[in-house]
Amino acid sequence: MPSIRQFEMFAKIAETGSMGEAALALGLTQPALSQQLRSLEDALGLKLFERVPKGMQLTPGGRELIQSARSVLGAVRDFGEVADRVASRPAGTIRFGVTPTIGPYLMPQVIKELHRRYPALRLYIREGIPSVQQGELAAGELDMVLSPMPIAGRGLHIEPLFREPLRIVAPPDDPLLTLDRLTRRSFGGRTFLTLDHRHHYHRQLEGVCAQFGATILADYEGTSLDALRQMAASGVGLAMLPEIYVRSNAGGIDGVRIAEPGNWTEYRSVGAAWRSSAVFAKLYQEVADIVSEEARRLLAN
C-alpha cells in the first residue's frame, strides 16, 4: 500500500510536470524523488509518468489514478481538521487560492471584513492558474479557491458568486476611438493581448476574437491585468479588462480608454469552491458570502 508521502509525491509531479519543481516543493533532492517514484511504480506494477520534451506527463494509467490520490490527500487534510476541532484547536488559517485576474483588486476589502469578524483568523492568499489550484484544492493543499467559472473537480462544493462585465480598452490615440459607431467588424484584423493560455481569460478571449475576426498576440502572455493595461496603453494591442478592475483603486484605466461595439455584453462568472467534506465548510461559505457581497457592492457603485 502506498504511503501518504508517496501520494504527495505522485500528486506534486502530476501538478508541476517537472521532477525538479516537484522535488523543490517537497523538500527533496531530485534523485531521492526519482527513487521514491520508482518504488511507487514498482509497488503498483505500472508506470505513472513518461518523460516528454516539456517534462513529466501522466501515462493513461497515471491519469486513472491521480484523482484517487488527490482524494486520499484531501481526506488526510480533513482528518486533521476534525482532530483539531475535537481537540478544541480550530485551524487558525485558511489557505485561499485565487487567480491574479481577481485577487489584487477584490480581496483587500474581503480580508479586512474577515479580520473584523474573526481577528484570530489568518487568510493565506496564493495566486495561481485556476485549473492547477483546483487540483491543489482536491489534494488538500488549498482550503478554498476563488476562480472564474466553470470550476470542476470531484468532491467539491461549487458556489457561484457573481457575474462581472468585461470591458475592451485601447490607447487614447487608437483609430477605434475616432469612429462615430463601433461594431464588431471595427475590430477585424486587430490584435488583443492575453494572459497565460491556461487562464480562463485566455479561452474566453479566444471566443471574443473569433467573433470579431481579431487575433491574439502570439509572442506575449501577460502575468497580470496591470501588465495587459500597460501594454495596451503603449499601443502594443487591445486588452479586455474585468469591470471591477476598471473601477478599483488597485486597477483603473489609466492610459487607456473604453472602446466597445454596440450591444457589447461579454461577462464572466466567478465562483468559489471547497471540498464538500471540509469540516469548516460553514466558515468557507461565510467567506464566499463576503466575497459575493463585496463584488456586488463594487459593481453597484
Image (tube, rainbow, N blue to C red):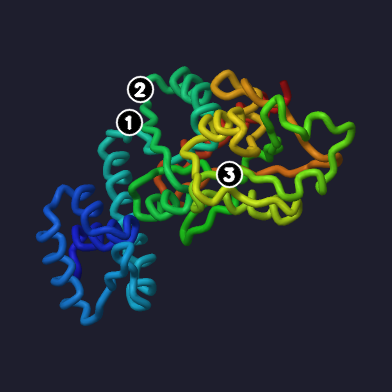
Residue 276: tell me if it is visible: no
60 and 68: which one is in front?
60
Judging by the rendered image, the residue that carries numbered circle 3 is 271
Is residue 242 left or right of 102 when viewed as pictured? right
Instruction: Measure the alpha-carbon separation of dots 2 and 1.
Output: 7 Å
Tell which of 158 and 233 is nearer to you: 233
Q: Earlier in the sequence, mark 1 or mark 3?
A: 1
Q: Residues within 10 Å of mark 2 (few under 14, many from 20)?
A: few
Question: The residue under label 3 is which amino acid type?
Answer: Gly
Residue 299's place in the image compared with 191, above or below, is above
The answer to whether residue 205 is visible is: yes
User: What label does residue 92 carry, if any?
Assistant: 1
* C-alpha separation, residue under disc 3 versus residue under disc 2: 26 Å
Q: Rounded to the nearest whole Å, what is the CA distance between mark 1 and mark 3?
A: 24 Å
Please indicate whether residue 155 sits to the left or right of residue 71 in the image: right
Question: Measuring 68% from the left and 32% from the top, which residue is drawn there?
Answer: 170
Image coordinates for residue 241, horizontal then vertical, percent = 63, 35
Q: Are marks 2 and 1 in contact (CB under 8 Å)?
A: yes
Give the residue furthest to the right.
180
Check disc 2 and give the amino acid type. Ala
- First-in-chain label (2 vs 1): 1
> Is disc 2 placed on a helix, strand or loop?
loop
Residue type at numbered disc 1: Gly
* Residue 204 or residue 120, whichever sits in front: 204
Location of residue 83 (image quadrant): top left
Q: Which residue is mark 2?
A: 120
- Give the mark, 3 or 2, whose residue is nearer the N terminus: 2
Which residue is at a point 69% across and 38% down the rendered structure image?
A: 166
Image coordinates of residue 204 in percent, x first then y, are 64, 51
